[in-house]
Image (cartoon, rainbow, N blue to C red):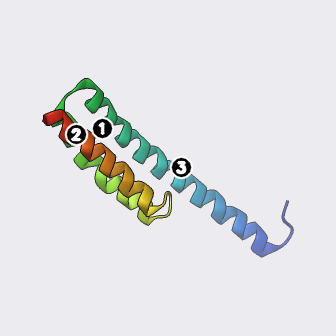
Amino acid sequence: MANIKSAKKRIRQIERRTAVNRSRRTDMRTHVKLVEQAIAAGDATAAQAAFNDAQPRLMRSAQKGLLPRNTASRKLSRLSKQIKNLSA
C-alpha cells in the first residue's frame, strides 16, 4: 500500500478512471453486439438503426482512448459493409 499522499491520490484517480472506462467499454461492446445480432438475423433496417446508434459510441470510445482510432474505424467499416451486403 502506498504511504505517500500523492501516491494515495493517484490510486483513487486510477480507481475512478477504471470504473468510467469499464462502463464506456461495456456500453460500446453492447451496442456493437446489437448490430451484429441484427445482421445475423438478416434484418437490414434493424441493423442500420443499431449501427446508427453504435457509431458515435465507437468513435467516442476511440476519442477517449479506450481503443485505437483505426480499430474503431475498421470495426465501423466492416459492420457497414455487412449491412450493405444484407440489403443488396
Q: Amino acid at mark 1?
A: Val
Q: Earlier in the sequence, mark 1 or mark 3?
A: 3
Residue at image mark 2 = 83
Q: Residues within 10 Å of mark 3 (few under 14, many from 20)?
A: few
Q: Position of residue 78 (x, y in %)?
A: 32, 46
Q: Amino acid at mark 3?
A: Arg
Residue depicted at x 42% and y 65%: 63
Q: Residue furthest top?
A: 41
Q: Nearer the viewer, residue 61 or 43?
A: 43
Q: Nearer the viewer, mark 1 or mark 2?
A: 2
Residue depicted at x 53% and y 49%: 22
Q: Secondary structure at mark 3?
A: helix
Q: Disc 3 vs disc 2: Cβ atoms closer than 8 Å?
A: no
Q: Nearer the viewer, mark 1 or mark 3?
A: 1
Residue at image mark 1 = 35
Write down the quadrant of residue 2 in the picture: bottom right
Q: Secondary structure at mark 1?
A: helix
Q: Secondary structure at mark 2?
A: helix
Q: Amino acid at mark 2?
A: Ile
